Image: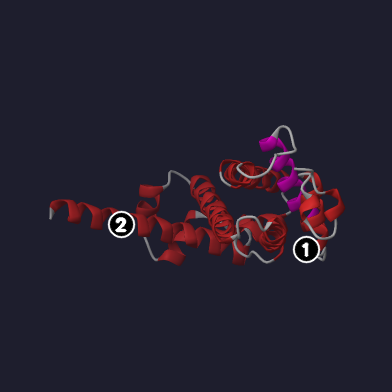
Amino acid sequence: MEQQERTRIRHTRDERRDEILRAVIAVCAEQGLARLSVSSVTARVGCTRSLFYHYFPSKEAAFDAALEMTIDAFINRLRTWDRQRVRGDIEGALDGIAELLKSLVVDTQGLSRSIALDGDAMLYTAFVNRVSERCARFICENTVVDFARHHEVLIDHVYETFYVLISGLILFIRSNPSVDTETLKDIIASTLHIEGYTAKYADRRPER
């Protein structure tokens, strides 16, 4: 019974912390990064400044935690893509990841959009770095491992290749939001040397 009570209290505290982070994201999305302040967040949540500081030592720390929450959401979508892809259907997986990557840049609202629109190149670069690093590590530890069970991995420096590919595509899509997913798919497949597994470039399929 005592353990259940501690669990209930911990969950309540976690929910309160997440509520503050969602307020940080909302303030940035609606008013811009420059208007983010402890007061603007507490007013939105309806909590005291002392409660805010109970969870975060500063607005910068809260912003960083909100940024991590946003990236967590990206990774969860990537995890869903990896779980739902059909094993052996490499072209289908390429279609899915191209669509997902574009939607993360073009359709995502909230904090990531605020950073993109704010014009702070250093902040956006740092954001892209963190997204690319976590996405690349997830893919290397999961998707690549699964692929390698059945096919030869034809690239060296696997993590570095995925990091450069993801960060480059994010920046490219941001500058060219009308790019079609077929083009993105071709870029991904060619970079990873798996274009031979698509119908378009079937003549390039590696020999078994």
Q: Which residues are magenta?
A: 158-172
Residue 145 spot, x, y in % from top left: 59, 42
**Separation of residues labelled 2 and 1 (CA atoms):** 40 Å
Residue 59 spot, x, y in % from top left: 50, 49
For the N terminus, which image quadrant?
bottom left
Above or below, 208 against 106 in this view is above
Residue 11 - label: 2
Name the residue tied to disc 1.
181
Residue 48 seen anywhere in this rendered image of the structure: no
Asked if the stretch drawn in magenta spans residue 201, the answer is no
Q: Residue at point 47% right, 45% down?
A: 58
- Name the N-terminal-most of marks 2 and 1: 2
For the C terminus, which image quadrant?
top right
Foreground of the two, 6 or 91: 91
Query: SS class of the residue under badge 1?
Result: helix
Q: On the picture, is 111 further left or further right than 94?
A: left
Q: Residue furthest left?
A: 1
Amino acid type, mark 2: His
